[in-house]
Amino acid sequence: MSTREHEQYPDKIVMSTPIGQALLAITDANHIYISADVVTIRGKEVRASLHVNDYGCGNGYEPSREQSCPSSWYNSLYATKAGSFGNSATDAQRKAIVAAWVPAINEFMAAHPELRTAASAADQNNSALSIEHDIEELEKKIAEKRAELAKVLASGRQSQGVVQFPCCKAYGVASKKHVCDAPRYEADNS
C-alpha cells in the first residue's frame, strides 16, 4: 500500500501576455493549459483557452495538434467574443491569440524551469499512485479468486447442492423429483 498522496500540479499561475493576463495550468512537463476570461484584441474583448504541448522537436511549446491533422492547431483553441452567448471569435482574433500566447508561454517557461520540474514530478507521482491503486484492486480480485478456488477444491463443487444426474449427465440441484427428459446414458459394459 502506498503512503504517498496525490500531488496537485502547478495551477492558476498568472502570466502576463501582450493581450492581457492569463492563467496557466501545467499538467505535466509537456502540456500546458492557458486560459483568460478576457483578452483584448484590436479593442475587442475575447474569452479564450488554449492547450499547448512540447512535442520535443525543438520548437518549445506549441498549440496542441489535432490527431487527424497534425499540422492543425485550430481545435486546441477555444475562443468566444466576451459578453456573447458562445459567438466564436473571428479567425483573425484566434490567430492573434495564438501569436501572443505561444511566445509568451515559451518565454515564461524558460524563465521558470522549476514549474516544469514540479509538473513532471506531480504527474509521475500521480501516475504511480494510479498504478498502485490498480495493483491493489487486482490483488483483491486475486485473493477472492484464490478463496473461490480453495472452496472448490475443498467441496468438489463451486456451488453447494449442484449435482450431476447419472441418468442424463445434466447438472442441477439435487432433487428426488428430477424428471429426465434427455436420453439416458448407460454405462458401457463391454
Image (tube, helix red, strand yellow):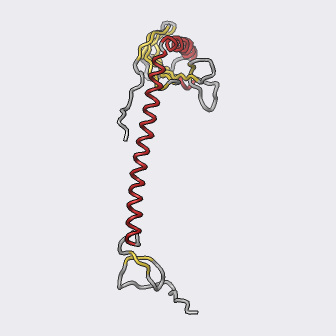
Q: Is residue 189 left or right of residue 170?
A: right
Q: Is residue 87 visible?
A: no
At x 44% / y 79%, what residue is drawn? Answer: 164
**On the image, which quarter does residue 61 sit in?**
top right
At x 39% / y 64%, what residue is drawn? Answer: 150
Looking at the rendered structure, the number of numbered marks drawn on it comes to: 0
- List x then y, in percent, for residue 182: 49, 83
Give the vertical position of 50 relative to 129 (above or below).
above
Work out which quarter of the rendered image holds the C terminus and state it.
Answer: bottom right
Work out which quarter of the rendered image holds the N terminus and state it.
Answer: top left
- List x then y, in percent, for residue 56: 60, 23
Q: Nearer the viewer, residue 150 or 138?
A: 150
- List x then y, in percent, for residue 146: 41, 59
At x 60% / y 31%, what residue is drawn? Answer: 67
Q: Is residue 160 visible?
A: yes
**On the image, which quarter does residue 103 sit in?**
top right
Q: Nearer the viewer, residue 159 or 83?
A: 159
Q: In the displayed image of the protein, which residue is found farthest to the bottom?
A: 190
Q: Nearer the viewer, residue 182 or 141?
A: 141
Give the vertical position of 35 relative to 169 (above or below).
above
At x 40% / y 47%, what residue is drawn? Answer: 137
Give the vertical position of 111 relative to 147 (above or below).
above
